[in-house]
Amino acid sequence: MKKKDIRALSREELRNFFQEIGDKAFRGNQVYEWLWQKGAHHFEDMTNISKNTRDLLNEHFVINHIKVDSIQKSEDGTIKNAVKLFDGLIVESVLIPTAKRTTACVSTQVGCSLDCKFCATARLKNMRNLNPDEIYDQVKAIDQESRLYHNRPLSNIVFMGMGEPLMNYNNVLKSIDKITSEEGLAMSPKRITVSTSGVPKMIRKLADDEVKFNLAVSLHSAIQETREQIMPFANKFTLQDLKEALQYWYEKTNRRITYEYVIWDGINDTRADISALVSFCKYVPCKVNLIEYNSIDDPEFKQASSSVTDTYIEILERNRIPVTVRRSRGKDIDAACGQLANKQ
Ligand code: SAH
């Protein structure tokens, strides 16, 4: 029998486990406290649990903790952690400090299940989904670094590291439950943004599950053919389906979407591209976040000139669509968007 990661279980699931084996549900609370409040690394440490029960836990479960394997610091203050998982696989997470905020950017999969041509993570094989505790631990580690290096707790979290969060739906939501709970980091979901390349079915599920965090969608083109060229999976997840899913999201949540958008030379730099984006933005209340392209050594992709960005901004603003520009952070240590690929 393969042992399960006990920290992937919610309090309720642990209580159920004990009930099912004929013990008291409240034993689940005790073990949960050992795992989360007291940070136990071994069942043997759980001194108020009987030896028999500890042996039983040992038979069924393991206690996993991540290990921050190495830390790289950028000249702009950005910190990148290489995080070693229990099975030796590595993911990366990033701390991004600004004057007002410190943001954690965390990974949700080892590698990625999608195939965006401009993203370094897509070149890795998708090895596996991260467990909820593995996602939570990344946030926790960055919170500690934020306190240590910047004398303040973490203020925001973005699920924009390695992987497609909505392809690891349950574990991502469980990790957010933990991050927002009193016994976790008690963070407001308003300070959390999940970024997806746009999986329509899962966006609908988020709406049905009445999540309270923010949603960002990596759009990059509002023209189906162009989007398919740079994000081949988009032939299955079409713009039409995406649009309908986003409308559904807005009806249910009343929260506007952020579209992430990189402008590349010769790919999406024409007036037609801008017009398509403007039309797409009319479907649902939204804002556009223009992201600086971070090179991944592919000659096909080059950031468009700043005059093209200016034209985008001008036309979006003329159409009263809020637009912001995200400057790259941590480029010198390959910590910027799309660069996470375990180069070390
Ligand atoms: N899979 C999710 C989250 C990870 S990517 C998603 O696609 O949204 C986080 C953001 O970085 C996405 O908007 C993605 O499109 C963008 N990105 C990927 N590669 C990039 C690159 N080389 N330069 C700039 N942004 C990039």
Image (spheres, rainbow, N blue to C red):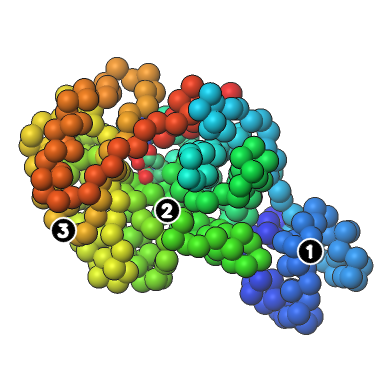
Q: Name the foreground residue: 27 vs 314.
A: 314
Q: Are marks 2 and 1 in contact (CB under 8 Å)?
A: no
Q: Residues within 10 Å of mark 2 (few under 14, many from 20)?
A: some
Residue type at the position of mark 2: Thr
Which residue bears the numbered disc 3? 283
Instruction: Identify the mark at residue 193; answer none if there is no mark.
Output: 2
Which residue bears the numbered disc 1? 34
Closer to viewer: mark 2 or mark 1? 2
Which residue is pictured at 42% across the width and 53% down the height?
193
User: How far separated are the C-alphas under marks 3 and 1?
Assistant: 48 Å
Give the structural element (helix, strand or loop) at label 1. Answer: helix
Q: Are marks 2 and 3 in contact (CB under 8 Å)?
A: no
Give the structural element (helix, strand or loop) at label 3. Answer: loop
Mark 2, ligand 1, within 8 Å: the answer is no
Residue type at the position of mark 3: Tyr
Q: Residues within 10 Å of mark 1 (few under 14, many from 20)?
A: many
Which residue is pictured at 21% across the width and 22% down the height?
305
Q: Within the image, what quadrant is residue 220 found in?
A: top left
Please state the horizontal and vertical placement of residue 198, each as a whole percent of the image. 31, 51
Q: Name, please, the residue furthest toward the front.
A: 99
Mark 1, ligand 1, within 8 Å: the answer is no
Please state the horizontal and vertical placement of residue 185, each as a whole percent of the image. 61, 59
